[in-house]
Image (cartoon, rainbow, N blue to C red):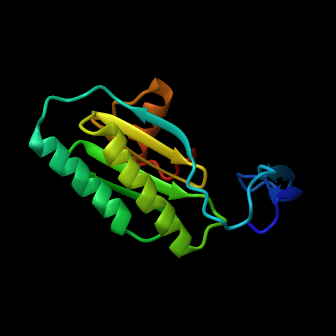
Amino acid sequence: MFATYNNFTMPVAASGGSTSEDTVYGLFQCRGDLNKGEVDKTVVVTKCGPSLSSNSDRLTRRDAVLSYLEASDGMFRVGGSGNLQGVAQCVGDLDPSKCQDCLSDAIGRLKTDCGATKWGDMYLAKCYARYSEGGDHSDAGMGKRFRHLFHGGSSYFF
């Protein structure tokens, strides 16, 4: 996580008890304009769903989920209340305090910018936060992955 580029090849044993080997290839490269470990809270993308009628129960649940995400620990956070789910994540080169700072800003902006909407995304340069009610989302494919996360899925990438 401290390198800006890495390319590697690794042999792995084939599944099924076979003695043959398969090969896994990996490559990553960071954007050249990003500094390692620095918090960049520039808004990259904001998306908000359709407005809801003012239903205080929905807003209360949304705020509770987002507050839970903000108060949680770790680089990846997930929470829900009924059919409203939320997820937040930082890039891997932030230390925990910088991740917390970034997610607090993203969640605050999400509440302010999206207001009373059915779903919302706030992508900053180094972190993101999102919520969705009932699995609805802006992109059908993203919505399916988002929904899958709360029904047995184990990973999510932005």
Above or below: residue 13 compared with residue 116: below
Residue at the location (44% across, 58% down)? 105
The quadrant of the image that shows the N terminus is bottom right
Task: Give the x, y percent position of residue 8.
Answer: 88, 57
Position of residue 72 relative to residue 106, above or below, is below
Work out whether 100 lies above or below 53: below
Percent x, y of residue 122: 46, 44
Residue 150 located left or right of residue 40: left
In this rendering, the count of numbered labels is 0
Residue 6 shown left or right of residue 108 in the figure: right
Q: Is residue 124 left or right of residue 78?
A: right
Task: Kindly tell me whether residue 150 is visible in this rendering.
Answer: no
Residue at 72%, 52% in the rendered image: 15
Q: Is residue 109 above or below residue 51?
A: below
What residue appears at the point 27 percent right and 39 percent down from the top-left corner?
115
Q: Nearer the viewer, residue 100 or 89?
A: 100
Residue 49 seen anywhere in this rendered image of the structure: yes
Which residue is more in the foreground, 105 or 58? 105
Can you tell which quarter of the image residue 119 is in?
top left
Instruction: Please identify the quarter of the rendering in which residue 158 is found.
Output: top right
Q: Position of residue 157 (x, y in %)?
A: 57, 47
Q: Residue at x 85, y 56 (%)?
A: 5
